[in-house]
Image (cartoon, rainbow, N blue to C red):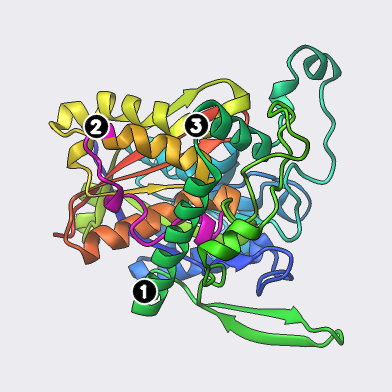
Amino acid sequence: MREAVIVGACRTAVGKAQRGSLVHTRPDDMGGAVLKALVERVGVDPKEIEDVVMGCAMPEAEQGMNVARLCVHLGGLPNEISAMTVNRYCASGLQSIWQVQTSIVTGSIDAGIGGGTETMSMIPMGGNKIVPNIRLAHEFPQAYMSMGQTAENVAMRYGISREEQDQFAFESQNRAMAALERGDFKEQIAPLRTFKYDGSGNKVEFVFDTDECPRASTLEALAKLKPAFANPKSGKENHGTVTAGNSSQMSDGAAAVMLMEAEKAKALGLKPIAKMHGFATAGLHPDEMGIGPALAVPKLMERFGKPLGITLADIDCMELNEAFASQSLYCIRGFEKEGLTRDRINPNGGAIALGHPLGCTGSKLTTQLLYWLRDHKKRWGIVTMCIGGGMGAAGLFENLDL
């Protein structure tokens, strides 16, 4: 049977949406830059790449028209490389890697790149034009429920307090700040030459190479933030526990992972760094979409971990996308019961601190996971996230660079 291996991964630094360094940077430019950087880092002739799959959660406007194909052109890659944009909302970047993996294993291609790009500065959550299906909105309005309200539902239904959520957010920020100070992300980040217009309309060019979302926080400051989503079922006016401080940050960024058939990598003299062993998704009621990882991870471990002889207790690092503190805490409680201790989940902080550029996030977290496993000489890792509309996804990775 054919085997696919990962031979390289990199990402841009993540910018704060709407007010950060990438506010005037197009998603296809970000994606093109990261594709170009990845090919150069791996040291492979770009003609060896047969297909590029890029995730994007809101594929319209600046990131419409099959943005993956535009990224190929902007990255200076050969016209012969085909490309496809995929959308599974927050799991799009992880889905793209699995898409390339399966194409290699089934013999469709020998080498490809899976990644993601997203600008939340230029494209708002939900897109520029939301047109609900009237019948669905009437019969099943939860299909269109806001992500923040689903986080409130999880907090209320499963007894997750405001204090717990703020403490979780505080720890995420501290872990991310410590990782930045240690320089843990430097090697995985491809410096991005870009620009931004200042307050006077002047074009300022610079190199963006450091995540800018993490910020020093205190529990006192977090406790003062007002709830961002009123909970109509709480019985109290404007009552809620989900705030800007214990939710993921809207962000901009791109990431990419190169995969290759094992024998081809060997023939090209490339050393495999990792392997993706499996991918699983799960569906659930949209009004509590955040608990998706708690359903997807067990399916992943049953289908792919069990044949390898590993359980959740054997996972050395999990990158759990922190869409909201409430849903993260729910999922972590379940993972802890299966032997995965909290210190192995988001050891360098999560999306509350580092940002969540939607369709990019799955490939960004995969990049972070692979570098963490390599740096700490650990073997097994999982990337998992909840998905808008009521889903969860998870991928199982093995570090081969031991």
Q: Which residues are magenta?
A: 337-356
Quarter that holds the N terminus? top left
Residue 88 found in image quarter:
top right
Which numbered marker is on residue 159? 3
Residue 167 horizontal/vertical position (percent): 46, 54
**Is residue 352 magenta-colored?**
yes
Q: Residue at left 20%, top 63%?
A: 376
Q: Nearer the viewer, residue 39 or 176?
A: 176
Circle nearer the N terminus (2, 3): 3
Decide whether residue 306 is among the magenta residues: no
Residue 75 shows in this picture: no
Labels in figure, total? 3
Determine whether the residue tagged by mark 2 lies in a helix, strand or loop: loop
For label 3, the SS is loop
Of mark 1 and mark 2, the one earlier in the sequence is 1
The image quadrant of residue 286 is top right
* Mark 1, residue position: 187
Residue 197 point in image, percent of width and height: 78, 81
- Crowding at dot 2, Cα within 10 Å, few <14 / some 14-19 / many 20+, comes out as some
Amino acid at pointer 2 = Glu
* 40 w.r.t. 149: above or below: below
CA distance separating discs 1 and 3: 40 Å
Judging depth in this view, the residue of 222 and 187 nearest the camera is: 222
Identify whether 222 is placed above or below 393: below
Please name the amino acid that badge 3 sits on.
Gly
Q: Is residue 332 above or below residue 25?
A: above
For the question of whether residue 109 can be seen, the reply is yes
Q: Which residue is mark 2?
A: 338
Q: On the picture, is 283 further left or further right than 107? A: right
